[in-house]
Amino acid sequence: MAKMAVNIKTRDMTADDLDDVLVIEGASFQIPWSRGIFLGEMAQPFCHDLVALVEGRIVGYICFAIVCDEIHLRNIAVHRDWKRCGAASELLSRMIAISSGKGARYGTLEVRKSNVAALELYKRFGFVVEGTRPSYYSEAGEDALIMWANF
Ligand SMILES: CC(C)(COP(=O)(O)OP(=O)(O)OC[C@H]1O[C@@H](n2cnc3c(N)ncnc32)[C@H](O)[C@@H]1OP(=O)(O)O)[C@@H](O)C(=O)NCCC(=O)NCCS
């Protein structure tokens, strides 16, 4: 059941956020990103990393890259206690606003075929499945769906 609307703010991720981010990351993915991967992302000028906050507490994050006129969504996750509160939607909206301001016109991402929550979320933002990478997720041999959107 959907929760009540909450006031979600976003800001750039910093290294000080990583303890909180890594807790969410570890609970969200079978092969979570390490602290080093997040730090590497933050060091790249073409990468953008945002956190979502509710009353000052980090509840989610997004990592994306802008390559020419394309947004590459690289990571997004929300703490289990704050799912279905609009945090991912707020992060995606900010991603699109920031990227559009820098001239991006397209978005792309990869998602597990079985990840219904993410697929439904991305469809809401205009992403459509354009291809498949067979057995992309090697630990389970699961296919990745490749999605694209025009902004
Ligand atoms: C996918 C994920 C980021 C969504 O975060 P969220 O903050 O709960 O998403 P939102 O609240 O913004 O949801 C927006 C819409 O997406 C869809 N959606 C989200 N979760 C869903 C679910 N479990 N089942 C079906 N649709 C879902 C709904 O349309 C929802 O709108 P509604 O709540 O009004 O019905 C979150 O479930 C998560 O962290 N999953 C684990 C990490 C992950 O899989 N990341 C994506 C990797 S590709």
Image (cartoon, rainbow, N blue to C red):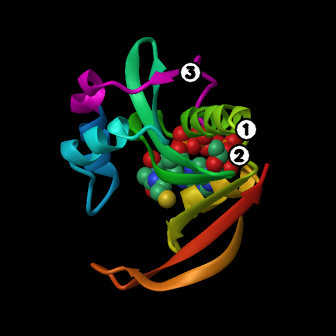
* Residue type, label 3: Ile
Whether residue 100 appears in magenta in the rendering, the answer is no
Q: Image quadrant of residue 89?
A: top right
> Which residue was labeled with disc 1?
100
Q: Is residue 85 above or below residue 70?
A: above
- Dot 2 and dot 1 residues touching (CB under 8 Å): yes
Q: Is residue 88 visible?
A: yes
> Which residue was labeled with disc 2?
104
| Of residues 61 and 105, the one drawn nearer to the viewer in this rendering | 105
Left or right position of 90 against 26: right
* Residue type, label 1: Ser
| Of residues 6 and 105, the one drawn nearer to the viewer in this rendering | 105
> Which residue was labeled with disc 3?
8
Provide the residue span drawn in magenta: 1-20
| Of residues 15 and 2, the one drawn nearer to the viewer in this rendering | 15
Cα–Cα span, label 3 and label 1: 21 Å
- Say whether disc 3 or disc 1 marks the residue closer to the N-terminus: 3
User: Where the N terminus falls, by quadrant?
Assistant: top right
Query: Which x, y percent locates residue 21?
Result: 30, 35
Cα–Cα span, label 3 and label 2: 24 Å
Q: Is residue 31 above or below residue 82?
A: below
Q: How many marks?
A: 3
Q: Image quadrant of residue 79?
A: top left
Q: Is residue 60 above or below residue 146?
A: above
Label 1, ligand 1: CB separation under 8 Å: no
Name the residue: 39% across, 41% down: 44
